[in-house]
Structure formats: structure tokens, C-alpha cells
Amino acid sequence: MLEKCVDLRSDTVTKPTPEMRRALAEAEVGDDVFGDDPTVRRLESRVAEILGKEAALFVPSGTMANEVAVAAHTERGDEIILEGRSHIFLFEGGGPALLSGVQVYPLPGDRGLPTIDAVKSAIRPDNCHFPVSRLLVLENTHNRAGGVVLPLEAQNKLCRFAHENNLKTHLDGARIWNAAAASGIPEKQWAESFDSVAVCLSKGLGAPIGSLVAGGREFIRKAHHYRKRFGGGMRQAGILAAAGLYAVDHHRKRLTEDHRRALKLATSLAPLAGISVDPSRTETNMVMLQISNDAPPADVWIEKLKEEGLLIIAMGERAIRLVTHLDIDDEGIERAVTAFTRVAGGFAS
């Protein structure tokens, strides 16, 4: 059943391409916990080069990449500052508190970006009554804001302000590849202002598993310890790293196709009754729909659309997210529009 559906739930649902499967099968491997896996080493060097960092560390997931970075930058009892809809705050199971013993100071943001004044107000005075403000985290592209690309100069100004106030900076760049593809600005420039960057291979790039965290050599040395403590040491991980290498070298440029299809989808759905979408806010591969108050809630749309062969997820009682990806072609977009048209028409009749 699922194989026949158009799956717009996430860009994590992709299957490896035949070429990627070949790279997996032919990977040269070793024991990565001993530092002996040559394919992992090549992937780490390649991603560090792309991001303009001294070193990188291969980990199983984006959550682990972020949590390893938080742990390596902080001490127990510290505080990290981030935007209130960020992935680390909403979707990592309370990891900063559980794994690193730090608390989180969430800030409001404009499309995922807090203001300098908001960050300034969150920095704690040097007083024994308060935790130490240690780390500023940004997310680019920003998931809950609809896959938007944070403006480069505004992002960099925040990082400069953070460093001037003795904060380290971390970028949750799970979809930094999309930011680079949409803007034409290389990943290295997006990463330049940050002390560390997390990137994901299993979202837009279409690898089956894996993320990396990149930064200075001393930071990565500490991160390596936390990867082990968090259970992220893998053995013949070159099989997985080979897929990541293939994705990094062959799937970054094609992300503009996902963006084009997302914009086509948003534009086609905009006239339908019961939902609203602003195509001008569809910057990358995500389309965010708001459901009107006189229409059924998101869970009803999800069930009806599933009957039409379309898989989607809710982002609240009256919000839906659609994500284009490697396995969605132009025909898939047309099928999605047809499904929405039928369901919206049925609700309006």
C-alpha cells in the first residue's frame, strides 16, 4: 500500500538509488571505533572541506550530531539559547537536559531567527544564582518555519554578537544543503560564523542513514568522546559512509529540482477551498498549509488524503507540512494536487 502512495511526509523517506546501492556494496571498510575505516575517514574529510572546518565526525543521526555538539560545548548546569521552534528544543526528547545536564532558553523568532535584542536579554549575568549562558544555536534551513533559509548576514550578525559575549555558536544545518542550493551561496559560507555545524545525509541528499558534526580539531576530539558515551560508535561504518559520500558528491545540485516541485505544489494548491498557502514563502522543499476554521482539522485531511494515495503529516491541529524529495517526480506532484483537489472539493460540497 505505502509503495503505491505519493509520500510527502518527509525527505527522510527516500530509498537509495541504484548507484548509491552500488557504492554501498563496494565500500572499503574497517573498524571505525579503532579509526580504521577508510571510507568513513574520506567522508569526514570531504564534509569538513565542504563546510570549511578543520575536522568532522560521522554519527548515526541528526539528533546525535546536535546532542554531541551541545555536550562538547557545555558543562553541566550551563544554559543554551535557541529559537523556540528549533529541532533541538522540540524534537530531541529533552536531550540537552538528559545527556548534557544543561537547560534551554527558548526565544521567539521571525521565521526561525531570533533578534539580537532577544539573545541579549537571554544572556545571564555573572551571578551564582544563574546558569552560565554558554551556547547559541541556530537552525538553517528552519523546519518549523517552513524550510525557510535564514538570511546570511542576519545569521552572521547574531554569531558575531554571540562571540563578543563569550558564547559558542552551533548551527543545526541538517538541511544546509537546501540553503546552499536555494541561495547559490556555498555551504562553507553558511557555516563560516559557527564554531560547529551539524549536517544530515538522510534528508534531502537521500542517503539511508547518517549525519556529521564539524568544527575545530579540539572540538571534534571532545565530540568523539561524547559520540562513544551516547552509543554512536559504529564498526564497519564505511558501508553507510559510502552512501553519504555518494550523496554529497551527486545529490546536492539536484536539490533545486525538489525546490521547483515544492513551489509548483504550493502554487497549485493555493486556490483550493479550506486551506491557505503562500507560495512566496515556499523557499526550499517544504510547503506549509494552514487549514481554515470552517474546514475539518488536519487529522481528517490526513486520513482522506491517504485514501487518495497521498501520505502527509500534521504540524498542529490546523497545519500540514508537505516535503518534496529525491523520490518525488513531476507526476507525483500532479497526483498530490489531484488528491488535494478531490478532498477539498468533498469537504466543500
Image (cartoon, helix red, strand yellow):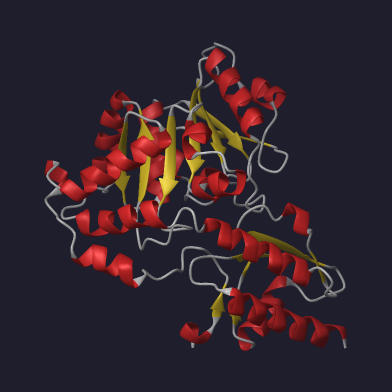
Q: Is residue 316 visible?
A: no
Q: Residue at x 70, y 78 (%)?
A: 337
> Residue 201 in the image: x percent, y percent?
40, 54
Q: Is residue 166 above or below residue 320?
A: above
> Residue 246 in the image: x percent, y percent?
33, 57
Question: In the image shown, does 178 or 276 lie closer to the viewer?
Answer: 178
> Residue 164 in the image: x percent, y percent?
56, 13
Task: Tell me how many marks there are.
Answer: 0
Q: Residue at x 55, y 74 (%)?
A: 329
Q: Residue at x 64, y 25 (%)?
A: 119
Describe residue 285's horizontal placement relative to residue 93 as left or right. right
Q: Residue at x 44, y 68 (%)?
A: 14
Residue positioned most to the top: 126
Q: Quadrant of residue 300?
A: bottom right
Q: Is residue 213 visible?
A: yes
Quarter of the picture containing the C terminus is bottom right
Q: Is residue 321 above or below residue 303?
A: above
Question: In the image shown, does 86 or 259 lie closer to the viewer?
Answer: 259
> Residue 314 in the image: x percent, y percent?
64, 67
Describe residue 37's horizontal placement relative to residue 107 as left or right. left
Describe residue 339's horizontal placement relative to residue 328 as left or right. right
Question: In the image shown, does 35 or 45 lie closer to the viewer?
Answer: 45
